[in-house]
Image (spheres, helix red, strand yellow):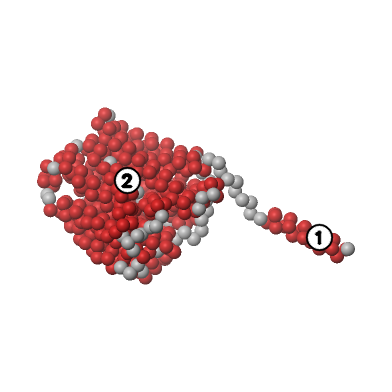
Amino acid sequence: MDRSKKVHTKNMIERRTKSRLKTPQAEPDPKLLVRFITASVAIAVLQGCVVTLISYSSILLGEQLGGLTNGTFFAVFLFTSLFLSASVVEIVGSKWSLIAAMAFKTIFVGSFITGSENKAEQWPSSVVGALFGGIGIGVLWTAQGVYFGATAKGLAQQQGFPSDQATTWVCAIFASIQLTVEFVIRISASLLIRSHSVSAMLLAFWILSVCATVGVGTAGIRTTIQRNLYSFSECRHLMLSSTQMLFLAFIPMCYGILFGLLTSYVNARVTSPALGSASLGFISALVPATAAALSYPYAFIAEVIGKKFTLLFGCLNFFALGAITSLNPEHSLRELRWGIIILYILAGSSRAIFEGVGKAAFADMFADKKPTAFACITALFAFSSSLTFFTSVTLPPLVLAVSLAGFSSVASWGIVFACDGTKVDEARILNKPRDRVQSSFFVLSQGQEF
């Protein structure tokens, strides 16, 4: 009898000890989806302001300072994404990393106001703003990926969805918000310049950026701590040890060159002189509009003919844009007037393939190393963008245009060699409709939306 009592008492003590040591589970958040949509709108608003100002940088700051500012922005972005952002998010958590990153990007937006109003402070304010902006975008890229993953997990638990389906919905919501907001902000830039002035546009964008940062801080989102995201050594090892990564590396580099060529040359020397700076927002809005319109069609086309041939068509887009800008002098392009839109449509088509099918190909090839693979993609894009902007200050635009055409040709061969003999070369890339959506939109939450 005494022995049975002792066993019973021992069991009770063990149960109580386990209950005390058990980690309490976070209560489900009934407003999780509302908070996510609020945060997504805020992130998209700030990102739209940043991208639009980068498009106007060579016009507002001059070609030399605009190129140096953008080059510094992407160089710091490259350094931050490889060496700093993962550690910051692991230590601070996703929420405070998002807030800090957006505050840094708001400083970048504000630097345009200082530089445009006081010419004496234009250089220091622009460079300092680029430093803060580069750090901000680098940390934001990692933090938003962690936050989106936590949101998808929470929705899956609340609604009883499979985790991949929840990820699909989360990324689809963010992608649609991001593209829509970017389109609206680019249009708003032209409307503000036409109805008021450039200063009014800059002030409005700065106010929007501040509101977006405050919006994320007050949205009530919960912080998430995620360990072992990725490291520079892992990225370096993947780049040097994987022949597939080396072959496919030219795709994000082409996109970086395209972005730099479009911003430093087409916007500043062709579109603005031909149509006026007030029309730049209208015509540059074709890039996100085209990307949004073609994302689904390209996903279905890739399902029929395979990713390899769809990616090759993307390289043809890169090559066409490079060939048009290299074979036609500035005055000939200006004489096209609104016919210049073909360059922006090609850029939007390239973005749709790169952000959708392209990154889905990376996800397939490196299924067990997705965070590291996406970090490599972002680093390659940032490196080529930074190099393009820096060289645009001293080298003629013809060099950049020929580089884009040349890199796209090399990228085509890389795609053939990388995809042959792999599952990416299968005729049907995705079997389920929700997987098609996920491949198109998941990458938008893991990469940058320039």
- Say what secondary structure mark 1 lies in: helix
Q: Residue furthest right?
A: 1
Q: Is residue 392 left or right of residue 356?
A: left
Instruction: Report the front residue among 109 and 241.
Output: 241
Q: Is residue 101 left or right of residue 62?
A: right
Answer above or below: position of 42 versus 323: above
Q: In the rendered image, which residue does mark 1 sit on?
A: 8
The x, y position of residue 33, in whole percent, is 49, 42
- Say what secondary structure mark 2 lies in: helix
Task: Tell me the quarter of the picture where residue 364 sits.
Answer: bottom left
The x, y position of residue 89, in whole percent, is 48, 53
Q: Is residue 166 left or right of residue 397?
A: right
Instruction: Report the front residue among 384 and 420.
Output: 420
Q: Which numbered disc, 1 or 2, marks the residue that appears first in the sequence?
A: 1
- Can residue 115 be seen from the camera position used here? no
Rendered residue at 66%/55% (across/down): 22
Rendered residue at 29%/37% (across/down): 187
Task: Tell me the quarter of the picture where residue 378 sits.
Answer: bottom left
Q: Mark 1 is on which residue type?
A: His
Report the quarter where the N terminus lies.
Answer: bottom right
Q: Is residue 306 left or right of residue 144?
A: left
The x, y position of residue 361, in whole percent, is 35, 60
- Can residue 165 be seen from the camera position used here? yes
Rendered residue at 49%/40% (across/down): 34
Q: In the rendered image, which residue does mark 2 sit on?
A: 292
Q: Mark 2 is on which residue type?
A: Ala
How many numbered circles does the render carry? 2
